Amino acid sequence: MSELLVLGLSHRTAPLELREAVALTEGRAAAVMTELTAAETVGEAAVLSTCNRTEIYLVAADPVEAESLALGSLARQADTRPTEMAGHLYSLRQRGAAEHLFRVAAGLESMVIGEAEIQGQVRRAHELALVEGASGPILNRVFHGAVAAAGRAREQTAIGRGGVSVPSVSVEIARSAIGELAGRTAVVVGTGETATLLGRSLAARGARITFVANRHFDKASELAAAHGGHAARIDELPGLLAEAEVVVTATASPHHVIEPEDLAAATGGRQLLLIDLAVPRDIAPGCREVEGVSVRDIDDVQAVAERNAGGREAEARQVERILESELDRFEAWLSSLEVMPTVAALRAHGDEVVARVIAENQGRWQSLEQADRERVEAMVRAVASRLLHAPTRRLREVAGSDRAYESVSTVRELFALEVEAAAESATDAVVTPIRRKTEG
């Protein structure tokens, strides 16, 4: 028996210093998945790592051991002891794990409620697990369901209306700190999705933008052309700091891209606002000590986002109802896995009996024409199929109910079924169904 579970931390449970320590690049995430799926108890794995969360999703025969393995892996990535991380982690199983992923994909667990970027991040996490061969039937279904549910929520509610996101909140922070942005000189360090949204928001406010590329200069050029700005390479950044009024960083660099010495030489004590949206951080903590420099990080963005969260509660409740419906569909599918190996074995048993009877009687049909022989064989198969139709239907009807175990056991005993091989070929996993806890 296997269970679905998630172990992780987020901006709701862990400080920025810990979140950046366990922020996983694709390479590190792939290594974690490879390590975990090598364990006998873990059948499937996927890693979701964004600036606000790092989560490990597993399908495991022994969830307690799997959680211990996942905790150990995260602790090694953070270069710390598991006991120091434990207080910041959450662990969910079965329906709770699936529901959490659905909420994450829909933006209900995001720093900015309803932000759209997370849906794509969930999709890419699943794609990486597929590429690495770590995902299987259960995680494939739950990730696909989460992305589909998030899409439905955005189509049917106004949860994402207005394009509210971490980049848009960051631009509002800049506007509050230095005034209107029209004609101001802004530098955006990074060329990813966040930088694209930053450029759009800054351009809408009339800022003059320079996009700085850490690696992809062609992408910086595209962004500059789209938003009437300029493109520069990372080695030009110190010179750009001398002219900038606001700098926003959003790279995937494992190292700081702005150090205190860069600022001291560039600013000369004048006012400069730095907004760091990266995890791990792009701006060294010591930059806060440089005269005239103000630094905001992702936690500062969170504080503003929480103050501005009012007005989306009604939309969030509508999204929750949609997620509940989609989650029920996933639960029904997962529950069916409890009986499907037996259904497959029952059908295989019927086919085997038919084939054996036909083979035993081949010598008696020598006078039959080929067409008549085929009619007899079809009739035998039809009789077997009709005999098995009722027990097959009954098994599917009780899937996920309290009667499932008793019904499956009875059918296996009556027909002397060997189910294990059929289960492996049909689903690649035998899974404990997710069920809600009932009161009382």
Image (cartoon, rainbow, N blue to C red):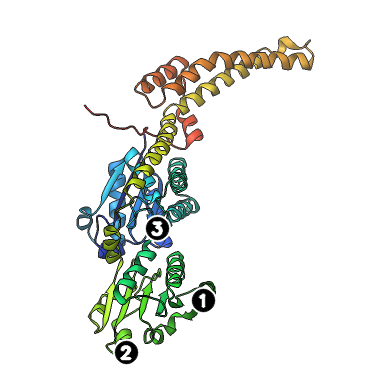
Where in the figure is residue 182, as x and y percent of width and height?
Answer: 41, 77
* Residue at 27% in and 66% down: 300
Q: Disc 2 vs disc 1: Cβ atoms closer than 8 Å? A: no
Marks 2, 1: nearer the viewer: 1
Location of the N terminus by quadrant is top left
| Residue at position x 71%, y 12% in the image | 363
The location of residue 307, given as percent across then percent down, is 26, 59
Q: List x then y, in percent, for residue 286.
A: 25, 78
Q: Nearer the viewer, residue 231 or 404?
A: 231
Q: Is residue 367 left or right of residue 44?
A: right
Dot 1 alpha-carbon crowd within 10 angstroms: few under 14, some 14 to 19, many 20 or more = some
Q: Earlier in the sequence, mark 2 or mark 3?
A: 3
Q: Amino acid at mark 2?
A: Ala
Residue 99's place in the image compared with 367, above or below, is below
Relative horizontal placement of residue 333, taking residue 170 as reference (left or right): right
Residue annotated with mark 2? 265
Q: Which mark is residue 29?
A: 3
Please identify, in this view, whether the residue under mark 2 or under mark 3 is nearer the observer: 2
Of marks 1 and 3, which one's residue comes earlier in the chain?
3
Alpha carbon of mark 2 to alpha carbon of mark 3: how far?
38 Å
Mark 2: secondary structure: helix
Q: Is 126 rendered above or below residue 400?
A: below
Can residue 236 be seen here? The reply is yes
Q: Label for residue 228? A: 1
Label 3: element kind: helix
